[in-house]
Image (cartoon, rainbow, N blue to C red):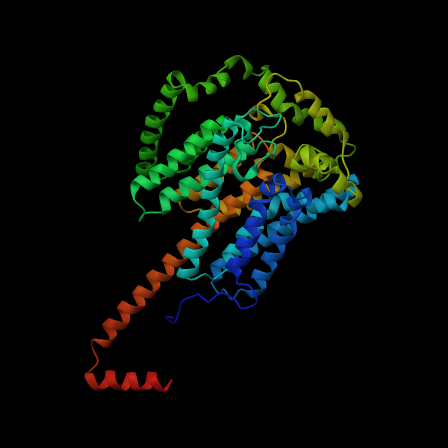
Amino acid sequence: MVAGTNYQPQGGGIVKGSTLILIAFAATFFPRLLNSIGFPPAINFVHFAIVPLACVIVLFQTRVKDKRQITIADSLLGGLFALFAITTASAILNGAGVINVVLDFLLLTEPFILLLAIMAVPISEGYFKQFRKWLLGFAFAHLFLALAQKVLLSVGILRHTRLTMEDNIQGVFYLSSGGHVVGATVSLCFCLYYFVSAKKAPMWLRASVCFATLMQILLADAKQVILVAIVAWILLILSRFKNIGVALQYIIVAAVLLSIFWWCIQNVELFKAYKTWIRPEIYGPDGDATILKSGPLWIIPTYYESVLNWFLGLGPGHSIGRLGGWMLKDYQSLLEPLGATTHPVTDVIWATWNGNYLDSSMFSPFWGWAGVWGDLGYLGLAAYMYLWIIVWTRLCPDDFSRFIVLNVLVNGLIFTLMEEPGFMLSVAALLGLQWQERQLAQQRRHREKLVAYAMQATSYLSHDDLLYLNELQQRE
């Protein structure tokens, strides 16, 4: 190893850090599929123990000395501590159970915890390639399974549930509520990563992965996935206006693709489902979509008992986040004995959506940013946003990473994907891969400079001096 670099080999122990991270990711990525083939529902909670444990082990094993890397890790840890303190304070104020605190905190912070672990692993070129191969293998298995589900559902080998056939095309998120949207979004993120990073792969292969992903989105009728991607892309363009040349390139490409997309909506059968959303009358200030979507923002404050509720919310799991909206009901037999608590506002907001003709998740009153605010108030929302600001400013210098983060933030305005572990840990893994690739590239450049400097220095030495230096090196 060239002296002066900040790389250290992976820490010792029974299991290497990168392997621990892969185990943690798999424990989050596959439990829905395992549950659908007969594993007990508790399998969906295993990752809540494995991910933090893997992160703690990795942090204790790491020997990273890069000051910038340590500063970022300290900032993330500080943000995590602040959010945990706010979650605990909110629980105390509102009488929420301890299990509510643990689950709500982990649902929001697991991706940051995993990203922290990936950053802390001082990985080599060989381990990076292996790590990347495993993650892409998981993603391609998910994509293949989603497309296979379409065939198996069509011929009757798989029986679809109360949901439509399209909603059951979910890949590894099989038989979960909203799994078709989660599965399509995960495939889109991995597809784009593969397209921009697999530069040595033939273009036909990269294009084929993109085409297969588009087919999954259309066959699963996951319309909002494309809409969110378009909005995220527009925001990415706006974030690049400091570089007029790059922004102009994006604007031209976006205009062409949006024109093609609009033509497909009007003329291609698979895209005509998007016409169901092109109804301006439902989006006005008094439109049904606007009233339904904004309902939690005026319903939740009517249940405040103190001015402190504005700052700390109604308590973790007590409003419209993933925990309060779904998990506490779906897993009542598991969580109630552990002291889980609920709040009546959740049922009130459910009543505004049940039976509504706007039954798409696009118009759901259960959406991520409102859930964080409803549970933890303005302080919790600020702490959560602080974590994303760190990620955006410190870990997202490239357009792909920024697009992925914007995809998450926009999804937070639609549904509860910000608290969907399989999706969010996929995002964290991709951001971590980009981080590690930049670190390795920086190390390569550093080594090349040192080698060039060494070669330049030795060119001024005589043959006898070179022999003497070689002898000294052998003695050391």
In the displayed structure, 155 sits above or below 468; it is: above
- Say which quarter of the image contains residue 436: bottom left
Q: Position of residue 110 (x, y in %)?
A: 60, 47
- Say which quarter of the image contains residue 312: top right
**Residue positioned 46% across, 51% down in the render:** 134
In the displayed structure, 296 sits above or below 308; it is: above
Given residues 40 and 195, the one toward you in this image is 40
Residue 469 seen in this snapshot: yes
Left or right: 348, with 469 as reference point: right
Q: Position of residue 408 (x, y in %)?
A: 52, 37
Q: Position of residue 24 (x, y in %)?
A: 57, 52
**Residue positioned 37% across, 58% down in the render:** 442
Q: Position of residue 7 (x, y in %)?
A: 44, 65
Q: Quadrant of the C terminus?
A: bottom left
Left or right: 468, with 125 as reference point: left
Residue 318 seen in this snapshot: no
Left or right: 463, with 446 as reference point: left
